[in-house]
Amino acid sequence: MEKIAIVGLGQTKYKGSREETFDELVFEAVNLALSDAGAEIGDIDNVVTVSNDFWDGRTISSMAVTEASGAWDKDISTVEGDGIFGTLYGMMRILSGSFNSTLVVAHVKGSEGEMNLITNAMFDPIYQRALGIDATSSAALQARCYMEKTGATEEDFARVSVKNHKNAFGNPYSQLPMEISVEDVMKSRKIAEPLKLFDCSPISDGAAAVILSNKQGLKRFKKDPVWILGVGHCSDSYTLGYRDLTNTRALKNAAQRAFTMASIKDPMKELHVAELYDAYSYMELLWYEGLGLAADGKGFELIRSGATEMTGDLPVNPSGGVLSAHPVLVAGLARLIESTIQIRGEAGKRQVKGASKALAQGINGPCGQAHGIIVLGS
């Protein structure tokens, strides 16, 4: 594969509610990315926007941000999904041979939507949607299945929440830095058994952007490149009943493709930091297994051992993760940005020493139906 680099980053601060409109958030993120790259919009060959009609509350949601993303007189495409998948498509645009650089920008204003109604719409319209199932209640089913199969406990989930909310204190973009205990998580309000308030990510507003370039385009940008070493993406069955919710086969497939491309044989030893999509606390444990960081059914042992703490063998979510800020559609792109910042050595209080190889994950659909993995290196 032709080498693709990340040369510009921009993200807004994530909040429970922001006064800015969609296009204002996008304009902020795009200009931050251009400034970071030492570039102007004329240095960008094409634009990929990431949006969703349901979350934006309008049809053809990308039209609301076309001008703000700098897409005038440029080729523009839209991805309805997570920002990681937008980045993968942005790479494809360059690999097609038609462009040397791509701007990828994602946005959401979760505060203006009804999460349960919006995420209910992603289920089968005949048999499942009428039950009122949504992202959180389906996640609760997956969490319970995981507990029954592996012996993981609610306290194990709580340890993830404690870790990630604490890490968020080092991230100026995070929404919910908190100093909490396992007991605090256990006592927090129940949302959907066995998930409690502190097991669930917040509703957030925000936007993020990255600039991609091949070797030919690098002369336009002043920032030292962080290279994409490997990518992988895979989707499982649409219908929940057709899946074993404890078998992360789509993640395993995506991760193996990315690791093979990046020549990684032992991710636990060869990666220095990982940014995972922990929309709910239990997910981080399950994703450990899908990524090969732990054996199947043993993901909870990593959180018990402290291996994924900032001082552990492989720090996971030093940014605070999605539990500390969850701008839907943007969150995967934020994971990619945080991974890139780590490799640059620009992460400040959340910096992992010696980080030169990192992993970022994005997901789409209920219970991690689809996964996108990107491995980065200096």
Image (spheres, helix red, strand yellow):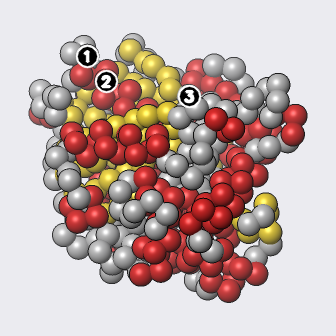
State the separation of the CA atoms marked 1 and 3. Answer: 21 Å
Dot label at residue 80: 3
In this image, 251 relative to 155: left or right?
Answer: left
Q: Position of residue 194 (x, y in %)?
A: 74, 66
- Secondary structure at badge 2 equals helix
- Residue 368 seen in the current view: yes
Apparent side of residue 67 relative to residue 53 in the rendered image (left or right): left
Give the labeled residue for mark 2.
Answer: 92
Quadrant of image for the N terminus: top left
The percent coordinates of residue 206 (x first, y second) are 57, 48
Sooner in the amino-acid sequence: mark 1 or mark 3:
3
- Name the residue rendered at 12%, 31% in the picture: 215
Q: Say which of 224 and 321 sits in front.
A: 321
- Amino acid type of the residue that numbered disc 1 sits on in the rendered structure: Ser
> What distance separates the C-alpha of mark 2 from that of mark 3?
16 Å
Residue 284 vs 377, above or below: the answer is below
The answer, for residue 107, to whether it is visible in the render is: no
Task: Between residue 164 and residue 223, name the one nearer to us.
Answer: 164
Q: Is tag 2's residue or tag 3's residue first in the polypeptide sequence?
A: 3
Whole-percent x, y for residue 132 in the image: 85, 42
